[in-house]
Amino acid sequence: MTKEQNERWNNKVDIVLVPDSRLSAYQKAIIAEDYNICGLSRYALP
């Protein structure tokens, strides 16, 4: 089977990034700023 014939290989999926629940609100804010996703509790990559 080639990758063109493999449905699972060709399906697109969304990746959703969420903060680690073990982090404090302050730590989450620092990471959000570092990755330029301020104000978001979830970040979806299409």
Image (cartoon, rainbow, N blue to C red):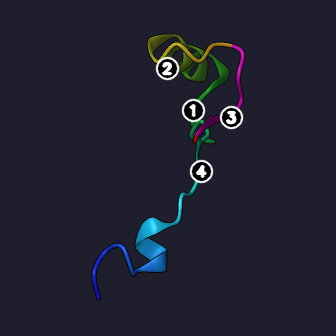
Q: Name the residue under label 1.
A: 23
Mark 4 and mark 1 lie on one chain; the one further toward the N terminus is 4
Q: From the image, which quarter does the C terminus lie in?
A: top right
Residues at circles 3 and 4 in contact by the CB criterion of under 8 Å: no
- Distance between mark 4 and mark 2 Cα atoms: 21 Å
User: Within 10 Å of the Cα at label 2, are there few (<14), some (14-19), or many (20+) other Cα atoms?
Assistant: some
For the point 63% across and 13% down, the residue is 38
Which image quadrant for residue 34?
A: top left
Q: Which residue lies furthest to the left in this view?
A: 2
Residues at circles 2 and 1 in contact by the CB criterion of under 8 Å: yes
Which numbered marker is on residue 42? Answer: 3
Q: Give the range drawn in magenta.
A: 39-45
Which numbered marker is on residue 31? Answer: 2
- Distance between mark 2 and mark 3 Cα atoms: 12 Å
Q: Position of residue 31 (x, y in %)?
A: 49, 20
Residue type, label 3: Arg
